[in-house]
């Protein structure tokens, strides 16, 4: 998907919501577990319930590959069911030496036709460039994540007194551009978003951590937005597991509607 299409979708819907499809077979409602494909049946109802409120979906690949071949089948069926108007993210966090990264890129951009894939930057330029060679596809590079362990490396300072994540943001801009490169910045790191924006003013940011992880949407928008909004805010568990019985779709619709309404209010200010 081209940047201008994504931006237009955000303004048309007045929403920058991304729904994370972290579908755990052990958490889906019991009545679905005897279906031929429980994961897909769950995802199908979640998509039907949330498609009008969101602009993107982000399947977390670990939840599918943990199920072996059937999980990959469920993933492909899910991806094919997502409307073409929605941006799709393979949350795979890949990143390896060049020829391996090239195979990962083919997997998610050719075999499965995702719009974007999350990539870890630790191994440097040759592990990232193969993903950037695909037209109208995106790399979403891990920069400042929302997990507790982010302090172990990302918030360590180098001899120039700058955080490691700042070096990642600065260096990666030499590899890609705002049309094919986004950065992951966790919602629980909202106070750092102002600094992130000073380094990457034009790039999109994928912001997980709103909802179950306690991220503040208002703070994320205040410190993270740019002239084109420039944000995809992801919510997973608080939407897809909002209900646990046969009415789980309605519960997901309500949860996504509330979040999208808050986004609409923020964009109108």
Image (tube, helix red, strand yellow):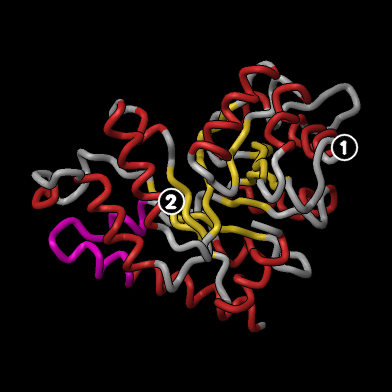
Secondary structure at numbered mark 2: strand
**248 is within the stretch colored magenta:** yes
Q: What range is drawn magenta here? A: 237-253
In the rendering, which numbered label is found on residue 147? none
Image quadrant holding the N terminus, namely bottom right
In front here: 161 or 239?
239
| For marks 1 and 2 on the same chain, the one whose residue lies earlier in the sequence | 2
In the rendering, which numbered label is found on residue 174? 1
Q: Is residue 224 visible?
A: no
Image quadrant holding the C terminus, namely bottom right
Residue 82 vs 28, above or below: the answer is below
Residue 174 lies in quadrant: top right
Find out whether the residues at labels 1 and 2 contact each other: C-beta distance under 8 Å: no
**202 is within the stretch colored magenta:** no
Q: Which residue is mark 2?
A: 20
Q: Position of residue 204 (x, y in %)?
A: 70, 55
Q: Position of residue 46 (x, y in %)?
A: 31, 60
Residue at the image point whose x is 71% and y is 29% from the top: 130
In front here: 140 or 221?
140
Residue at the image point whose x is 35% and y is 61% from the top: 47
**Outermost residue toward the front in this view:** 110
Q: Is residue 210 visible?
A: yes
Q: Position of residue 89 (x, y in %)?
A: 53, 47
Residue at the image point whose x is 36% and y is 51% from the top: 237
Marks 1 and 2, how far apart at CA:
29 Å
Residue at the image point whose x is 88% and y is 22% from the top: 159
């Amino acid at each position: 998907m081209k940047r201008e299409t994504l931006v237009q979708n955000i303004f048309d819907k007045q929403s920058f919501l991304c729904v994370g499809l972290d579908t755990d077979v052990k958490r889906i409602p019991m009545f679905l577990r005897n279906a031929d494909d429980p994961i897909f049946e769950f995802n199908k109802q979640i998509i039907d319930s949330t498609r009008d409120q969101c602009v993107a979906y982000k399947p977390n690949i670990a939840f599918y590959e943990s199920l072996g071949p059937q999980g990959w089948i469920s993933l492909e069926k899910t991806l094919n069911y997502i409307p073409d108007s929605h941006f799709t993210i393979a949350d795979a966090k890949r990143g390896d030496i060049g020829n391996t990264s090239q195979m990962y890129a083919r997997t998610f951009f050719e075999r499965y036709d995702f719009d974007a894939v999350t990539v870890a930057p630790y191994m440097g330029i040759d592990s990232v460039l193969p993903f950037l060679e695909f037209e109208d596809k995106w790399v979403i590079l891990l920069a400042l994540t929302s997990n507790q362990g982010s302090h172990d490396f990302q918030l360590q300072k180098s001899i120039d007194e700058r955080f490691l994540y700042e070096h990642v943001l600065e260096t990666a801009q030499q590899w890609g551009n705002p049309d094919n490169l986004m950065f992951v910045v966790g919602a629980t790191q909202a106070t750092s978003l102002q600094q992130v924006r000073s380094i990457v003013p034009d790039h999109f940011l994928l912001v997980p951590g709103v909802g179950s992880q306690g991220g503040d949407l208002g703070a994320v928008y205040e410190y993270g937005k740019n002239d084109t909004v420039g944000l995809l805010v992801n919510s997973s568990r608080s939407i897809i597991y909002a209900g646990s019985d046969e009415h789980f779709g309605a519960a997901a619709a309500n949860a996504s509607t509330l979040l999208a309404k808050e986004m609409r209010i923020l964009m109108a200010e």
